[in-house]
Structures are given as C-alpha cells and as structure tokens.
C-alpha cells in the first residue's frame, strides 16, 4: 500500500493540476500495473484508463473496476496506434525487462504517448536494501530475484536513453521514497494490503490521507526509486 502510494504521488498530483481540464475524459494508458494501478489512487472519474500487461487481470478486479479497459499483450509491440494516449504511466516495470530490450520498450512508450510519460523504476543503488529484505524473508520475494537477474537500471543510463530520442525531453526526476525507509514501509504495506485489498473506497481514502501526511516526509536523501516526467518537445 504505502510503498505503492509513494510511486503514484507525483503522477496523481500532475494529473490533478495539469491534465484535469476540458476536453474530458482524459485518455491515459498504464503499462504493467498488475491490476487497477492508477485507479486505486484516483477518485475523479474524468479519466479514461486503459491498462496494458503481459498477464490478464483477475476476474475480481475486472468486476470491481468496470471503468478500466484491461488489455493483455505479448510484451513487444503495443497494440495501439501512435499518439493514442494523452499520458502514459509505467510504474516499476523497467527493472523486470532484460537490459537489451529496455530501449525498444521505451520506444513503444514514446510512440503511443502524444504528450506526457511518467517512468518510475528502482535504481542500482537500491540493491543493498533489497538484499536485506531478501535475507529477512529467506529470498521468498520473486520480484526481487528478477531484479537481481536483470539488474536494476542506472539512473544515468535511462537519462541517456531518453536524451537519444530527439522528440522527447526529460522535464523532472523525482525520488519516491528513501531507500532504507523502503524496508519498514514495505513490510507495513504488506499488512495494510491484507486489510484493504478488497475495500475500494478504503484504498482511495487511505491514499488521499497519505498524500497529505507521510507522502511528503518519506522522499529525502538517496531514494529507492525515481520517477521521470517526460514530455514531447
């Protein structure tokens, strides 16, 4: 919960202040959310959310979130025309992609967005706290094993890949959560998720409260992950 909330603070704030204006609804794509993603944090219905993932969403999630257009694909070419979405979100996905395929993946994000991209990912300096969490739970978290196998991206590496695309520019890079605070927040989040996972409004209210309180306090020093705001030139 809270570690997930931290990832969405920057995009949600941007959408509310910059995107929420006529014409509505705003077409938004979220790539790889493994569920309803942005819609768990967003209380305004003036967005049209499509999610794209390599696995199909659970039947329960489709029933709980009929507003979302859930789409699956093979992880290669995204099944949309160019400039199909006003804004594209990709939250903590890049680290699950083999390094040799990351440039192609970024190219697809650039292609389907006509204006704005949010790209969030844990960085290489976060392997130390991840190793601590792995030891605490005896290497049971499969997502951490995948981070180890593929390697966490270097922030400078992704900046460089973005700069090579002459049609897009990096407007801002913002940290999400201090890398060592990530461990206790991650553990508490797992407990909170068990309490709130089937309570749609409870999740949204908790996120709203988190925005006004802890959210701003957890982003200091070297962060576990960073969010890049990219805009078309």
Image (cartoon, rainbow, N blue to C red):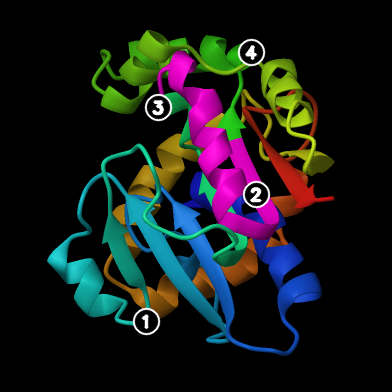
Q: Which residue is mark 4?
A: 125
SS assignment at label 1: loop
- The alpha-carbon separation of the residues under discs 3 and 2 comes to 17 Å
Q: Position of residue 213 (x, y in %)?
A: 71, 60
Q: Which residue is mark 2?
A: 118
Q: Is residue 222 above or below residue 107?
A: above
Q: Quadrant of residue 188?
A: top left
Q: Which residues are magenta?
A: 97-120
Q: Which residue is mark 1?
A: 67
- The alpha-carbon separation of the residues under discs 1 and 2 comes to 21 Å
- Residue 212 appears in the figure: no
Quick one: which residue is furthest to the left in this view? 59
Residue 29 or residue 198, whichever sits in front: 29
Q: Which residue is mark 3?
A: 96
Tell me: 175 left or right of 113. Answer: right
Residue occupying image coordinates x 75% and y 47%: 229
């Amino acid at each position: 919960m809270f570690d997930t909330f931290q990832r969405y603070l920057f995009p949600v704030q941007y959408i509310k202040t910059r995107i929420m204006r006529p014409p509505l609804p705003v077409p938004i794509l979220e790539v790889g959310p493994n569920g309803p993603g942005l819609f768990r944090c967003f209380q305004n219905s003036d967005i049209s959310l499509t999610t794209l993932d390599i696995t199909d969403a659970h039947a329960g999630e489709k029933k709980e979130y009929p507003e979302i257009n859930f789409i699956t694909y093979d992880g290669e070419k995204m099944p949309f025309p160019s400039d199909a979405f006003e804004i594209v979100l990709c939250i903590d996905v890049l680290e699950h992609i083999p390094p040799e395929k990351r440039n192609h993946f970024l190219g697809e994000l650039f292609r389907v967005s006509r204006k704005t991209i949010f790209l969030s990912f844990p960085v290489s300096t976060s392997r130390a706290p991840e190793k601590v969490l792995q030891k605490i739970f005896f290497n049971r978290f499969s997502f951490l094993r995948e981070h180890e196998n593929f390697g966490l991206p270097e922030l400078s590496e992704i900046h460089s890949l973005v700069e090579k695309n002459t049609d897009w520019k990096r407007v801002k890079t913002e940290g999400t959560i201090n890398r060592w605070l990530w461990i206790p927040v991650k553990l508490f989040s797992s407990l909170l998720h068990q309490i709130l996972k089937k309570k749609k409004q409870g999740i949204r209210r908790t996120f709203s409260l988190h925005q006004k309180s802890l959210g701003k306090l957890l982003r200091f020093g070297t962060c576990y992950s960073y969010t890049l705001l990219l805009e078309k030139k």
